[in-house]
Image (cartoon, rainbow, N blue to C red):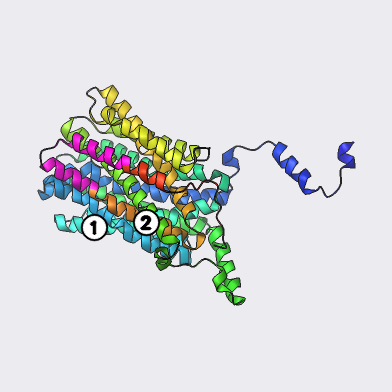
Amino acid sequence: MRALLAPWPPDASTAIITNVSAPQPPWYRQVTADQWRAFWAAYLGWMLDGFDFNILAFVLVDVQRSFEVDNALAGALLSIGALFRVIGGASAGAAADRWGRKGPLMFSILCYSLLTFLSGFSTTYRVLFACRALFGIGMGGVWAAGMPLALEHWPAHLRGLASGLLQSGYATGYMLMAVVHQIAYPFLRGRGDLAWRAFFWAGILPSLLVLWIMWRVKESPVWLERQQQVKSARVAGEPRKLQTSGFVSLFQGSLLPIVIQSTLLMGCLLFLYNSIAYLYPTLLLRDMGRQTLPFVVAFNIGGMTGAVAFGRLSETWLGRRGAAGLATIVGVASIPLYLFSTSGALLAAGALLMGFFGTGNFGVTPTYLSERFPTAVRAAGAGFSYQAGAALAALAPTLIGVLQDRGMPLASAMAWCIAGSGLAVLVLLALGPETRGRSFSATQ
């Protein structure tokens, strides 16, 4: 009877009560097909990026033997790719803000796939060094263009979860590389340079993803809406009403402090990751005499689940900073178990804990950086900050190599770098603002 007497159309308060009382579907059903496709484009691009980048980590001993270089030069091969990521992040990010997210993402995937393939034909250390440097450009571009594409598609209340899922793709690629190495390397061992070249040749496969993105993935609706806003403002003769766009604007006015704090934070976070992960297979194989697969799988399962868990946790009262800070603290506390355990069971437990906490803090970074910057410079700002941070963090493998050459055991060198960078992460998180709840506005 009350339903028959209710006014029609219902007023706003009635609508609100109806919406609140209605049962919510599971989060994955709140995401449309187009939103899922945008997610998979960014996720797979980043996952396969992680696969291609970590090829070198697994064959570094063979490369070092082939070209007869010391630990510092071997570490530099890992560092140079990370250093050049800043070029890819800045250029692809600026292009994504101007021409859309899809095109730069596809170009970046093609770039890193091709350079990985060409690395397998390197005839000297210098040629391989150059290929790894250029590889970094593609790697940086995937993150800069892919993360905004996915996050601008997804519902705002699921952005933290999407962030964690996206960032976990890198750990998935790392683990996939570990599995491929475990299966394929026994067949290649003893065949000279083929033992490492064949892995690089396989790195061309991610280029096939570009065809699917081209045909099936839609452009960011936030970016498209902004283009309409820009066009309307120009027609009306009021272009100054919109946030200034362009890469140069990142270093002007109120955006400059954001860029500085974000870059330093990403530098310390990525230095932390590099110290944890890049020479871990070498530590297991050379110094501990253990097979890499069980421990690397445990580490990356921890990284995958940790990124999702802390991305989701960042939607709670802890916020982005609290979730990342908690993960970092427990990660640093896991150093003894991760690096100095003598039993296989404890070493595996340490790998799982370090992956979950020590790298789980990265589950917060895509949405945190995206929320720091307005739509007009979101891809350029987030991409530059992340990849400029990667350039600063590129020193980690080289520094660890130098410490080894001066007599410090690899485990001890890694421990000092993990602890120092973890402390710096906590300080920089405290200096930055909380961003949970910020909206993406096309008018900015």
| Residue type at the position of mark 2 | Ile
Q: Quadrant of residue 87?
A: bottom left
Q: Tell me the residue at 40%/40% (across/down).
A: 361
In this rendering, the answer to whether 387 lies above or below 325 is below
415 drawn magenta? yes
Q: Quadrant of the N terminus?
A: top right
Secondary-structure class at tag 2: helix
In the image, 237 versus 420, the foreground residue is: 420
253 drawn magenta? no
Q: Is residue 105 visible?
A: no
Q: Position of residue 340 (x, y in %)?
A: 22, 28
Badge number at residue 217: none
Q: Is residue 220 left or right of residue 133?
A: right
Boundaries of the magenta span: 396-423
Q: Tell me the residue at 16%/44% (across/down).
A: 401
In the image, 74 versus 369, the foreground residue is: 369
Q: Position of residue 29 (x, y in %)?
A: 60, 41
In this rendering, the answer to whether 288 lies above or below 263 is above
Q: How many C-alpha atoms fall within 10 Å of the one at disc 1: few (<14), some, or many (≥20)? A: many
In the image, 380 versus 102, the foreground residue is: 380
| Residue type at the position of mark 1 | Cys
Q: Quadrant of residue 94?
A: bottom left
Q: How many C-alpha atoms fall within 10 Å of the one at disc 2: few (<14), some, or many (≥20)? A: some
Q: Position of residue 418 (x, y in %)?
A: 27, 39
Residue behind mark 2: 260
Q: Is residue 426 left or right of residue 22?
A: left
Residue behind mark 1: 131
Q: Is residue 284 left or right of residue 315?
A: left
